[in-house]
Image: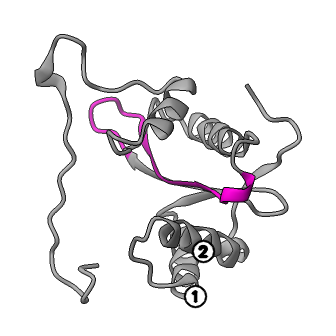
């Protein structure tokens, strides 16, 4: 289901500050580390310029953002797309904006030849899981086959005080 009154578009480097503001707000809302909107704007600009990430914004007003990463798929020969971030400001939730920005991101991934878009979310975040499933995402665990359950691991490699 598309949300016709909502415009979503791919960001250019001139949108880095707006993009960063939303991403910073997302991290603060979750009480997660953020280097701040100014630093995120510099990094977003670099990601856009170097092709490391693609950002999709909703609005105006700017109320939602998605961050995508593409990489070459060895086995399929097609690009693989990962949804790194999806955020809608709290006062605009429930209006279809998350769906609109994600549908725009899915269309962009298709245009770039990706066969799938993967993402991660917390097992206990039933609202997010329901949202993604309503858009056709499926849990990789196969019923009756517990060996197919996927876990996500991380190892910090050093860096600043926040481990980044």
Contact flag, marks 1 and 2 (Cβ < 8 Å) = yes
Looking at the image, which residue is at 23% across and 80% down?
163
Q: Can you give x and y, in whole percent of width and height, for residue 142 in the image? A: 24, 16
Q: Secondary structure at mark 2?
A: helix
* Gap between marks 1 and 2 measured at Cα: 7 Å
Q: Is residue 14 left or right of residue 105?
A: right
Please give the range of residues in magenta: 72-92
Return the residue at label 1.
38
Looking at the image, which residue is at 89% across and 41% down?
5
Looking at the image, which residue is at 62% across and 43% down?
105
Q: Can you give x and y, in whole percent of width and height, for residue 60 in the image? A: 85, 61
Q: Residues within 10 Å of mark 2 (few under 14, many from 20)?
A: many
**Closer to the camera in the image, 134 or 57:** 134
Q: Is residue 70 left or right of residue 24?
A: left
Q: Is residue 62 left or right of residue 135?
A: right
Q: Is residue 84 magenta?
A: yes
Quadrant of residue 129 within the rendered picture: top left
Q: Residues within 10 Å of mark 1 (few under 14, many from 20)?
A: some
Q: Residue furthest right?
A: 5
> Which disc is residue 20 wearing?
2
Image: 118 above or below 18: above
Q: Is residue 33 left or right of residue 140?
A: right
Q: Secondary structure at mark 1?
A: helix
> Which disc is residue 66 wearing?
none
Q: Quadrant of the N terminus?
A: top right
Q: Quadrant of the C terminus?
A: bottom left
């Amino acid at each position: 289901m598309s949300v016709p009154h909502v415009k979503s578009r791919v960001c250019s480097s001139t949108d880095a500050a707006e993009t960063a503001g939303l991403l910073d707000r997302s991290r603060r809302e979750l009480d997660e580390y953020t280097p701040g909107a100014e630093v995120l704007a510099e990094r977003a600009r670099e990601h856009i310029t170097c092709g490391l990430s693609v950002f999709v914004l909703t609005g105006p007003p700017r109320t939602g953002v998605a961050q995508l990463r593409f990489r070459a798929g060895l086995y399929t020969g097609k690009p693989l797309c990962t949804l790194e971030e999806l955020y809608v400001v709290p006062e605009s939730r429930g209006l279809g904006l998350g769906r609109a920005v994600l549908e725009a991101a899915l269309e962009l991934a298709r245009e770039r030849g990706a066969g799938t878009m993967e993402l991660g979310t917390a097992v206990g975040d039933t609202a997010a899981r329901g949202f993604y499933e309503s858009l056709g995402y499926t849990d990789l665990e196969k019923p009756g086959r517990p060996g197919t359950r996927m876990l996500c691991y991380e190892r910090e490699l050093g860096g600043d005080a926040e481990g980044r």
